[in-house]
Image (cartoon, rainbow, N blue to C red):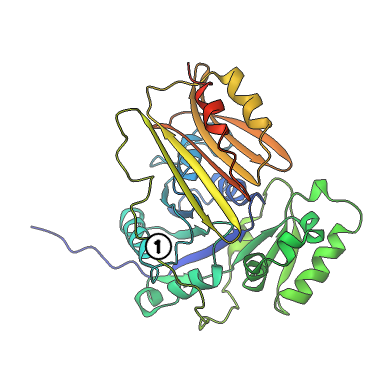
Amino acid sequence: MSVEQPPILAVPTNIITGFLGVGKTTAIIHLMANKPSDERWAVLVNEFGEIGVDGSLFEGQKTGSTKELNNDAQQVFIREVPGGCMCCAAGLPMQIALNQLLAEAKPDRLLIEPTGLGHPKEVLQVLSTDHYRQTLTLQKNITLVDARKLSDVRYTEHDTFNQQIAIADTVVGNKHDLYQEGDTQKLAEYVAQVGRPETKVIFSEHGVIDFAELEGSTTIDEHLPHHHHHGHSKPLASELPMPKNGVLKAENEGEGYQSIGWRFSSNKVFNRQQIIPLLVGLDVERMKAVFITDCGIYGYNLTPDGLTEVELDECMESRIEIISTHVDYSFETQLANCLL
């Protein structure tokens, strides 16, 4: 005899957004590691590329500062929506993933990380529909910004960058330890110009944000214009079965950027001493990867500030995603040469 499950009601929900490489994933990992121990959290992650790497990075970091993120003791549940802006096609990819995540996790808090090239106003609109009005309670929207980028017109003239600031209840000037004199003031002035009058500005290093910054209702108007709409007609590469050769490649483009990524079956092992210099030498906007190597499993994160490496406990397969203004197709051969 089946027992009807109680409805999921008023889950506190935060959008954590920011442009490419600003440290959103690092900030969420820190928040998860320091969440109230008696709470169940759910994290919905959107990626511009179709391969999907963030889920492996989240779930693989079960030791060290993140502790056991994905087991019952820590009670954190993660789901990915790869392949561009998750609000597209009338929000269907996002709604499917979100409904599955809420049913599985029955969370006490939901964190949503849109892709750095996504459209947060449209994500907010999906969350504000009647379908979610009782299920979710929209709390503060957090936008991470690297103030050093305010001198670069590729950021200040990019609609998504400005939209992320416009929807923020709190703007976090991340990577504060790397700022030069005047950067802090420049960010405060830019938020005053682009953001809303009540937007708060704080600063952080390494994505460390106090849990209290999540609490409290958002002040953004829920009735937002939906000016962005396009569909995804083909299956995502993250969901396709692995071909017999054990390698799957996918490309995507939009918002002035291109992505290219690969999945490698678990029996393909990389030479760690070769893969590191190859990744360091990349001239791209963003790179994320997880690799099964001869020395263990490692996650990699490349931004203009450099390459970071973290040891992981597990991953199902090796994956890499690159975002840039142009694609260097010779990289594929170089990557294959790092296989044992």
Q: Is residue 267 above or below residue 247?
A: above
**Residue visible at 60% across and 39% down in the picture:** 328
Q: Is residue 267 above or below residue 24?
A: above
Quickly name the residue at label 1.
Answer: 94
Of 207 and 279, which appears nearest the observer?
Answer: 279
Where residue 335 sits in the image (x, y, percent)?
53, 27
Q: Is residue 218 above or below residue 237?
A: below
What number of labels is visible?
Answer: 1
Look at label 1 and name its amino acid: Met
**Residue visible at 64% across and 57% down in the picture:** 19
Mark 1 residue element: helix
Query: Residue 117, located in which quarter of the rendered image?
Result: bottom right
Where residue 93 sits in the image (x, y, percent)?
37, 61
Residue projecting furthest to the right: 181
Q: Is residue 56 left or right of residue 150?
A: left
**Residue visible at 53% across and 64% down in the picture:** 14
Q: Is residue 272 above or below residue 112?
A: above
Q: Is residue 25 left or right of residue 79?
A: right
Q: Is residue 198 visible?
A: yes
Of 17 and 324, which appears nearest the observer?
Answer: 324
Q: Is residue 178 left or right of residue 246?
A: right
Q: Residues within 10 Å of mark 1 (few under 14, many from 20)?
A: many
Of 236 and 61, which appears nearest the observer?
Answer: 236
Where residue 6 sits in the image (x, y, percent)?
26, 66
Where residue 168 sits in the image (x, y, percent)?
64, 69
**Residue visible at 84% across and 50% down in the picture:** 179
Q: Is residue 74 left or right of residue 92?
A: right
In the picture, the quarter occupied by the N terminus is bottom left
